[in-house]
Amino acid sequence: MSKTGCQGCRDGGPLPFGFTMAFQPILDVSRNRVWGYEALVRGEAGEGAGWVLGQVDESNRYRFDQACRVRAIELAGALFPDTETRLSINFMPNAVYEPAACIRATLEAARRVGFSHQQIMFEFTENERMIDVSHVQRIIAEYRRQGFLTALDDFGAGYAGLNLLASFQPDLIKLDMELVRGVAYSAARQTIIACVTTMARELNVTVLAEGVETEAELMALRAAGIDLFQGYLFAKPALAALPAVSSLGGWPAAEAAPPRAA
């Protein structure tokens, strides 16, 4: 990677702190199966993401972003080395200098552990301010060209969700948990989520609801036509391991819900 000449590649060296990944399942309730796992950064002793991210700054942001991708792939290759289960990795758009060059370590890690890069989905969050939206568009275009999926995390919170969706249509959007919370008892939330789901379908974008904690929330979201879910109702993240999934196969079908776009 040093041959690219970009500043991030020249600033090598180990990170001054250690970390690992916890894995939380993403469920496809319509098919009663685990669709994928999100890799969530943790300290080596189980410290939360805030502890880890608190040690990331401009001097090590690129190295940290690259190291997270590699560590997530290495663990996924050992934990679920099949050809269908997805691995979702969070990345920092502002840490990507040149999309084609900065993806090389990811591709090499996938090849090394025998994990198909087509199983990988990259999440970017709208809570991280996009310094250069056109640069993010180039990142997404390159990742799609390479065969990765892309997802907009925390949709409905943070910086200009609708503007980002208008600028680039990812493969998925993940509804923010604050929008999901209490949806079973909120007509306003139900209406907003129904409209977002309809809009996403028109754009050929799949909706995933994260932070689901109750069966009432699940049923309300199923009624809106959502199939993909993540949250404590199903499983909490497990450190460097795959957690048991609660009641897999026993969730309700959608009632009068429109079909999800393929």
Image: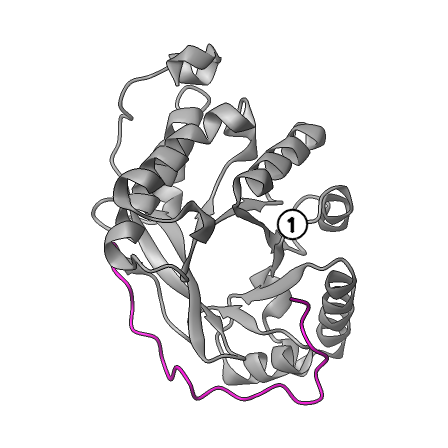
**Which residue position holds label 1?**
170
Quarter of the image with the C terminus in it: bottom right
- Where 123 sits versus 185, above or below? above
- Where 140 sits versus 3, above or below? below
Taking the spot 60% from the left edge, 59% from the top edge, the residue there is: 176
Residues drawn in magenta: 240-262
Which of the pair 68/118 is nearer the observer? 118
Q: Where on the picture, by quarter, is residue 71? A: top left
Quarter of the image with the N terminus in it: top left
- Where 176 sits versus 121, above or below? below
Residue 38 in the image: state x and y as whole percent: 42, 56
Tell whether 35 sits left or right of 42: right
The secondary element bearing badge 1 is classed as loop
The residue positioned farthest toward the left in the image shown: 45
**Which amino acid lies under the numbered mark 1 shown in the image of this protein?**
Pro
Which of the pair 256/215 is nearer the observer? 256
Report if residue 248 lies within the magenta region: yes
Q: Can residue 157 be seen here? A: yes
